[in-house]
Image (cartoon, rainbow, N blue to C red):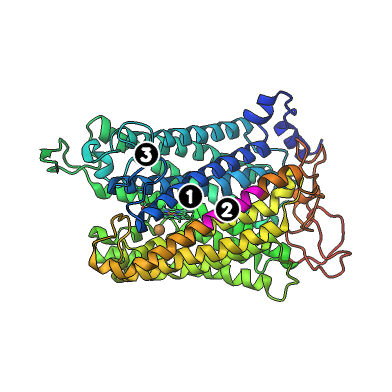
Amino acid sequence: MSEAHAEAAVHAHAAPTGFIRKYIFSLDHKVIGIQYYFLALVAVFVGMFLSLLMRIHLVWPTAHLPLVGEIKPETYLTLLTMHGTIMVFFVLTTAPQSGFGNYVLPIQIGAPDMAFPVLNMLSFWTTFLSFVIMLAAFFVEGGAPLHGWTGYAPLSAIPSAGPGQTLGADLWIISIAVFCAASLMGALNFITTTLDLRARGMSLMRLPLTCWSWFITAILGLLAFGVLAAAGILLLLDRNVGTSFFVPGGLVMTGIPVKHQGGSPLLWQHLFWFFGHPEVYIAILPGMGVASQILSTFSRKPIFGYRAMVYAMLSIGLLGFVVWGHHMFMSGMSPYSAFAFSVMTMAIGVPSAIKTFNWLGTIWRGRVRFYTPMLFAIGFVSLFVSGGLSGPFLAQPQLDINLHDTYFVVAHFHLIMGVAAIFGIFAGTYYWFPKMFGRMMNERLGQAHFWLTFIGTYAIFMPMHYLGIAGHPRRYSQLTEIKFLEPLMSLQEFITIAALITIGAQIIFVINLFWSMFKGPKASVNPWEATTLEWTVPSPPPHDNFGGRVPVVRHGPYEYAVPGATRDFVMQDEEQPVQMHS
Ligand code: HEM
Ligand SMILES: [Cu+2]
């Protein structure tokens, strides 16, 4: 038995037969990946519904809305907190990494499963539990918290600080801590799998860029979620045991002195953003991997600058840990610190620009096939650039003092983090759906979905830059009767109508997804004529992925248009003498 064989045998487990072991408590990375995906799908609809309530309230404040009735200012803050939290954690952290990563990574590296299948199952169910706890916050007395997705202290640390800050806030913090535990388990699994379970010949520099992105994201997760978990536990102690990590002395709440002393609200900000900034890369890096994969495949060209792409992702990950202060320019930090954080933040522009140029270089003069996955991958690049361009502005302390807490920031982070990552998820869905469910999605519905979402997204978030420059505050629910906001109202109405249409257009996606799952035309092994290992196995793959075969990798991941090859692409495990690109 070869070494790879022995490796494979250790991690192979017999196919389960009962329904529960097969679909509920499954150890199969493919089932777990799909479970994560559907969890994120439910979460994104909850998150979208909440954003719709906010948008409608902003422009029609007296409207009576389903489930929530009249929206008071504190209700708005609740919606905002839960929208942001659910989107960031349960959609953007869950689908691209845990969903697609789980499903695709082992197959792409030629492994029969993840390194620790039981841990994998545990991390899914822990994430599920965390989601249930988060939703429970809506239903307890006082409702969900209103401290924003950033949970700033002392608001988050003092139960009497507002409705929702009692049990709701406890549940929110517990949910986040449980989510951290799940993410740490997942990160360990991804790192070990990538390092240890690669098939023979799959050197690091032959890894598809998707695998690199999941690997780097896992390292970021390992470093960042530990800090957030610790911060969350300290916050719980402040709230329930009487410690004073984050609550300063001398605070008076509705006439009553708060019994805390000596804590620092700034400590929370440091801990939160030490996690929070890497978190935005946790959300976006997998999308970068997916975009690279798809742009190369559908341009029928090798990715431009493979090594540069790897090093750019590594340096984005590394720099991501030294820029958290750019969220705290308004906290009264020393101008010297602000300058340091500003310079480091600007430095991230370099690897980001390298990636963008390489994506464009990949499409340049390609024989481009404009199928839906490709459209969403191009959309991803477009949104990444549009959202990224406002970053260097916000990285200037002098400018940020004005733009901070305005809609300019809402525009920036929604474009670069929110919808860019969502486009990555859509691209991945349209691309891997045939492999995951053995059927093709409808191309026409896919294209309609793309154009409505693409135009809609820009219509929602582009005008927000203008609102922000005009001084429109964010996290603010009562826009009427404020003189300087009146002229901006028609723009707000435009945004809400755009949001209604864009969110409505997602129905096309859901119909396509479920209809195709059962009724779509059967998919072949390799419908996109791609080169990576998942396209060498049946759609959907058998329980052990390779049907007992142990793949041997002979080529890089993007061998398209290879001189001397019989077709315009060479599979990674193909026995064919070719002139190598990488
Ligand atoms: C359907 C598209 C979306 C719409 C219409 C939308 C709308 C909104 C609105 C109205 C706010 C409140 C702005 C304010 O008053 O300051 C908000 C905040 C936020 N949204 Fe979205 N959003 C969408 C998608 C997303 C996505 C995909 C994410 C994922 C990252 C996201 C993350 C956030 C965050 C983190 C906040 C800030 C919450 C806070 O201030 O604590 N949103 N969004
Ligand atoms: Cu940041």
The kind of residue tagged 1 is Met
Q: Is mark 3 within 8 Å of ligand 2?
A: no
Q: Are marks 2 and 3 in contact (CB under 8 Å)?
A: no
Q: Main secondary structure of the magenta part?
A: helix
Does the rendering let one see residue 412?
Answer: no
What secondary structure is found at the residue carrying circle 3?
Answer: helix
Q: Is residue 173 left or right of residue 300?
A: left
Q: Earlier in the sequence, mark 2 or mark 3?
A: 3
Q: Is mark 1 within 8 Å of ligand 1?
A: yes
Mark 1 is surrounded, within 10 Å at the Cα level, by few (under 14), some (14 to 19) or many (20 or more) other residues, namely some
Estimate the x, y position of residue 39 in percent, counting from the top left. 56, 40
Q: CA distance from mark 1 to mark 3?
A: 30 Å
The kind of residue tagged 2 is Gln
The kind of residue tagged 3 is Ala
What secondary structure is found at the residue carrying circle 1?
Answer: helix
Estimate the x, y position of residue 259 in percent, counting from the top left. 15, 35
Q: Is residue 52 left or right of residue 121?
A: left
What span is colored magenta in the figure? Answer: 502-511
Mark 3 is surrounded, within 10 Å at the Cα level, by few (under 14), some (14 to 19) or many (20 or more) other residues, namely some
Q: Which label lies toward us, 2 or 3?
A: 2
Please give the label number shown on residue 443: none
Estimate the x, y position of residue 242 in percent, counting from the top left. 22, 32
Q: CA distance from mark 2 to mark 1?
A: 10 Å
Mark 2 highlights which residue?
506
User: Does the segment drawn in magenta span residue 279?
Assistant: no
Mark 3 highlights which residue?
230
Mark 1 highlights which residue?
48
Question: Which residue reaches farthest right?
Answer: 566
Q: CA distance from mark 2 to mark 3?
A: 37 Å
Q: Earlier in the sequence, mark 2 or mark 1?
A: 1
**Residue at 74%, 42% in the rendered image:** 518
